[in-house]
Image (tube, rainbow, N blue to C red):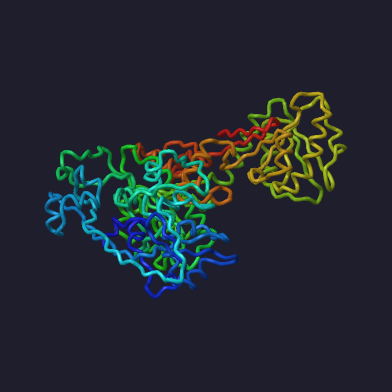
Amino acid sequence: MNLKRIFLGAITALSLSVSAQSPVENLPLKVINGVAYHYYEVGSKETIYSICRNLGISQNELINLNPSVADGLKAGQTLFFPAEKEVTPRIHEVKNKETLYGIGKMYGVTQEQLCKWNPGAIDGIRPGQRLIVSEPAKIQAVPNKNIPTVENPEGHVIKDGETLYGIAKAHSTTVEAILEENPGLDKNNYKSGTVIVIPSTSQNSLTELVETPDPVIAAQSENNYIAENDVTGNEVVENEDAVPESIEVSDNTPITIAITLPFMLNSEEQSRQAQLYTEFYKGFLLAVDEMRNCGTPINMLVYDSTDPSGVSGIVNDPNLKNANLIIASDAAAQLSELGNYGKINNIDVLNLFVVKDETYQSNPVLMQGNIPHKAMYDKAIGGLLSKLGNYTPVILMRNNGERDKEEFIDELKSRLSISGIEFKEINYNGTMNASDLANLEAAGKYVFIPCSGKQVELNRILPAILEFKSSSTMTDPVMVFGYPEWITFRGETLSNMQKANTMVYSRFYTNPDSQEAKNVENRFVDWYGIQMANSMPRQGLFGYDAGMFVINWLKSGSDQPVDWDGIQNGFEFNQIPGGGKVNGKLYFINYLPDGSIIKSSL
């Protein structure tokens, strides 16, 4: 098998069948849109492992037939299994100077049949293109007469919690095809109980099925190499002269991006961390899809770094040398090995997950994607000093309290002293009271800076600060300056942060009112059938921002990465003398009294 053309789940979904001896065959039947399905309702406390064991199927089989399962089960969820077995159609890879007529003669089929199975072929074919050259042979399952069969000849009824993406995958079609077949259907607003028409699978070519990223990485080789696919929909043609005149060839050189992350494909169940890395990959594919028409073909190489062969298997894959950039694993040792490989082969290696790694300082191809700790403090303090105006800094310390930001405070005091800026220090016991601020002038303006980033410590000081604010004779008399952890705070803490005009620094942030973020989140749900995980940062948005940055940079052809201000994460790389590149992007997040939130780059 040619590993360079393994499809992400599409061929797997077409060829998947359930063993004749499987307990699945004893499940009740529903006939939906003329197709019979066995169905199973998930009980409370059931797991993927227990269901697979009880039904006698593998985890991959379960997930390929029910993609939403990849991100967890819910009690009452309905799982569907085709009641027909399907034999995989034969696939032919077009060679130079081959024609539809010649290929048809080779397999004993007509040109009309080839065009029916491959709708895009009616406009011509080209070398490297894959064609379906035989119709799948179906064996009708014999239903148990004691099992009730529900017939719905008019279409598919959308169930509670069901998504268009999940419906499309179950019927081997696409969301776009469903929307085309149902003109009045709003892809962002549909209700359970709605009856929709499912388009015939024959209307969609295999290429169209592959163009939509699959929610689960489903193909794998002995070298833990998952896939390389031109996901722009354009074939990569090495010999332009061999292409028919009717086929338009991009003038741009294809770009190839490799991702090596711990997806845990060999495990019975993914860990929470592996699920988040899978979400990152899903978000990255959203960016690839958005950039599919940028004029530059985009190839993806994806590896599971938890495969037994490890990084040695990855770097021994000859396909990796085609990469323009490698997104490295989260393990420091693997990052180092990939960095050495990149240095030898002149391939940039982007590190997004090993925050404290410093090998970029000596390796010219390594790119540290997170602003380093010291640089972050320097930039945050510099930003604070530039915004002080006529505000006096007030450093707050609880006696015998938390001092987890002592390093930052020491650096801040040093910078304030060097800059000749007067500051005050206030010590308090337990919870700070208004009396602890009695020595501050009512006509003064102050920015309060605590020595801890913990929520419980912030809640000890905010009420007193707000009381001081209410008694002040000044307009906007107070600000609070704080730390990255604060962007996760909600409820009363967040409300008080806004009332106190709070400003924090962070490597990333997503404004909850951002329409851009909502659009990406809605696309994520449409494609994958589930919401992004409630993590910080949100890995789906992280993957999307990383994808947009990487693709826009690589297609520009510049040696210097382009600056990119994403929905959640930003990239602003600087060259290190004698080393690689480091991201210097840092944000200030302002929580304003009117309830608005402003994100700005430093």
Whole-percent x and y of residue 98? 13, 51
* Residue drawn 79% across the image and 36% down it: 465
Viewer-nearest residue: 41 or 34: 34
Tell me: 28 left or right of 344: right
Whole-percent x and y of residue 100? 15, 50
Viewer-nearest residue: 467 or 410: 467
Viewer-nearest residue: 289 or 451: 289
Does any portion of residue 470 appear in the rendered image?
yes
- Which quadrant of the rendered structure holds the N terminus? bottom left
Q: Quadrant of residue 182?
A: top left
Does any portion of residue 346 appear in the rendered image?
no
Viewer-nearest residue: 532 or 62: 62
Whole-percent x and y of residue 592? 68, 32
Whole-percent x and y of residue 296? 31, 40
* Residue drawn 58% across the image and 49% down it: 536
Tell me: 591 left or right of 375: right
Q: Quadrant of residue 335?
A: bottom left
- Which quadrant of the rendered structure holds the C terminus? top right
Tell me: 16 left or right of 543: left
Q: Is residue 274 above or below residue 574?
A: below
- Count of marks overlaid on the render: 0
